Amino acid sequence: MNMLTTNPPAARLTAAETALVEAFSAQIGELPGNGAVIGTRDRLLDDLKKSGLPTRRIEAWHYTDLKNLLRAIPEAQATAATEAVAPLVDGATVLSVLQGVADSRAAVDGVDIASLKDRLVDGTAAAGLTALDKDDAIGRINGSFVRDGYVLNFPAQAEIAAPIELQARHAGGQIHTRFPVSFGEGSKATVIERHQAVTEDAALVSSISDIVLEEGAEITWIILQQQGLADTHLGQIRVKLGKDAKLRLFVINAGGKLVRQELRIEVVGEGAELTLRGVNLLGGESHTDVTLVLGHNVPHTNSTETFRNVVFDRASGVFQGMIRVAPDAQKTDAKMACNTLLLSDEADFAAKPELEIFADDVICGHGATVTDISKTHLFYLMARGVPENKARAMLVNAFVAEIVEELEEEKLVEALEDIVSAWLEKHA
Amino acid sequence: MPAVQETVDQVRRIDIDQYKYGFETVIEVDKAPKGLSEDIIRFISAKKQEPEWMLEWRLDAYRRWLTMEEPTWARVEYPKIDFNDLYYYAAPKGTSGPTSIEDVDPELLRVYEKLGIPLREQEILAGVKTSRVAVDAVFDSVSVVTTFKKELQKAGVIFMSISEAIREHPDLIKQYLGSVVSTTDNYYATLNAAVFTDGSFVFVPKGVRCPMELSTYFRINEKNTGQFERTLIIAEEGAYVSYLEGCTAPQRDENQLHAAVVELVALDDAEIKYSTVQNWYPGDAQGKGGIYNFVTKRGDCRGHRSKISWTQVETGSAITWKYPSCILRGDESRGEFYSIAVSNGHQQIDSGTKMIHLGKNTSSRIISKGISAGKSNNTYRGQVSIHRRAENARNFTNCDSLLIGDRCGAHTVPYIDVKNASAQIEHEATTSKISEDQKFYAMQRGIPEEEAIALIVNGFVKDVIQELPMEFAVEAQKLIGISLEGSVG
């Protein structure tokens, strides 16, 4: 053999990798957790050190070379002043996480709420600190550094009318939060996960929501990401969908400099249904990557996924969407669409919608488009006396609004439409 | 439904492994010693009576190859290939190069007759003018004969084996060889550059429409031999050529390696149509044996308004790793890719295309139909890339997969990279099985199940079959039927 198969020598760490390792040694003494948690943290950081941050050579990170893109880690700032704001919709219960610390004492009737910190200290949250696979850099970073968040338990048949808003606000620094949530049998609720920067100071944010829907649960979960222009946001939502459970998951990205939002969804109960909608508003010099891995693991499950992306300025956007149908997951019906409006010659967009199918009796499809605003649509409006810039704005707005409107709850739709319009006004 | 019935009947006549080209021919051969080294490359180069610069070119590639690593990103699994356990040169005795048909070993002629490849220039057959195809027949490492050479010469078209072209047209070779797929392109292309033994060379001069279809027929016969052929097609300004490629190999228990490189160059207003029917031995029902097919095919639309069209029907090989691509460099150039990939048994296919849009107003179209049956895995992997300055680029991609049986897999991995806002990109993909309704409809009219499936499958792939030249379309349709035999019920 003339091919040598020796392992490559341990790669040198980048500045950001070194900073992470150093931050860990500096913080480990104060990171909450019992022996089991500390052990897990050590192991995850060790794995991170060994593999380094992912590069484009790793297929799952092909378009987001984190090693290259993440240049520096901002200093941790424990005391930056932030405070909770009014919820997105009136009447919602706010559970705030300020500068990475769950400070809210709010209670919701019928829901068991605890701070993650307490669960780390008593060790019950240890088992959840995992990396999903060898390429799960977010799982490793978050598992190593996570300080706080909320653990929510919705008992069986709980019906919570008012939305619950998990409000994570920061003023720069290192923020690592986590929200393990279980929805009991037949429970119904709406949860808004909102990430917001208060200042322009750079932050490294990692946040993992780990949610389980038991049989027949009907849940709406909204992720609204509004980080600052200098922030890195590494978000992940892990979902397990049980029998006949219905999840409506809306993901809106409207901020951040370097964003990776992973959606890792496993459909594990027959009759489950997923409605996934995404809106990505990209501008400035940002890089935003939405990566979906959706496993249909059992027969008779449905899913639809629609993503709408609007790309301005010098922004670059990425959508990776993999639908995996396991052997024997017959009668799966999965449809995915990713539509992009590329509105600047300096912007770019990469889409990789994947299908991986091991069962034959399925209907699966995906579609992807990338175009500019349709000239005929523009002409139609301009022929009616609408000036070009206004016509463009209307069309872009409509392109996105179509998705938001699917939420149906009037107050929510209005609140999100306002956010979308404000964003578009600023960037168009 | 005579055509369909014919397919079914034909299938029945074939033995369990369904591969009708699996025979082996005992023929005296001239072989290089086993293994790969600079000496072997010198041996090949000497055998081919190549000039010094060609040997240097090969050695450069070989040295580069030694530093490279085998790619692992494709969805294919196979035991590590021992590149030193192969013969890199095997030629039937007495055929140091293409000769006239009279000099060819009658045993070889019988092989091609058996394969149904016409090597005799039959112009008028029983008063009927048959469609004529010029053939370059490559047996293991050498081209045994090229037909219709004289007639093509009259039109100014050069069609010969690449070894001959290196000797006779060194200027063209120097100018174009490796200009589309460089010697450093990828692991297998670099290996090919080092050890390629034969292949076809086509040159169609300015303004000439090639008067007949050109084709090359590749046959691997020898045991433990790798086949490394290299094809180079150049269409000058305003030229047109349609080229067909066919492949078969004997049925063997061990795996054989085939790593080819195909380069196409289309200048202003030129058009190249490249069709492949790939039917290498796919291995037996247990997944034993079969060809490893690692191929780099790329077309360069160098000129304005040039067009390159790839059409492929992939039914054979244990492993297929192949991505015929188009670089759309010229303004208003166009690339097309039409593919049918059928996998059965334990076959693994990872195939697709790349459309690289560089020029203005370029367009591309991708139609891919994957059919998986048995325990096979069939992956479409494609890239559409619109570069920053590629104004008004247009792409349409459609990849459909059909699953027959619940033990197989169908996968779609498209990469869409857009860096220009004026681009218009559409991609769609579906995966499903043959609908019970369609099957019921056909069977209810008295069509047996197997035939009904063949009928539906033929409908599924029609878009691509239509793109094939007549001679190939019929063969391709039969092949698909045969490949899927045994996948029903």
Image (spheres, coloured by chain):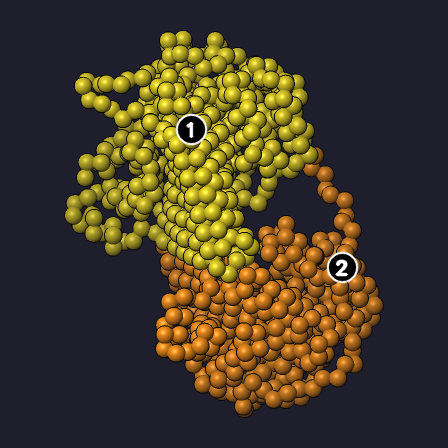
Residue A42's place in the image compared with A281, above or below, is above
Residue B384, given in percent of the width and then of the height, sits at: 49, 51
For mark 2, what is the residue? A17
User: Which mark identifies residue A160?
Assistant: none
> Along the line of sight, which residue is nearer the eye, A350 or A29?
A350
Residue A299 lies, in percent from the top left, at 41, 60
**Quarter of the image where one finds residue A257:** bottom right
Question: In the rendered image, which residue does mark 1 sit on?
Answer: B204
Chain for disc number 1:
B
From the rendered image, report the letter of the chain displayed in orange.
A
Between residues B339 and B263, which one lies in front from this camera angle?
B263
Q: Which is more foreground, mark 2 or mark 1?
A: 1
Residue A325 found in image quarter? bottom left
Nearer to the camera, B322 or B479: B322
- Residue at 41 percent across and 39 percent down: it is B269
Chain assignment, label 2? A
The three-letter code of the residue at mark 2 reads Glu
Is residue B389 visible in the rendered image? The answer is: yes
Residue at the location (56% across, 55% down)?
B388
Q: Is residue A208 visible?
A: no
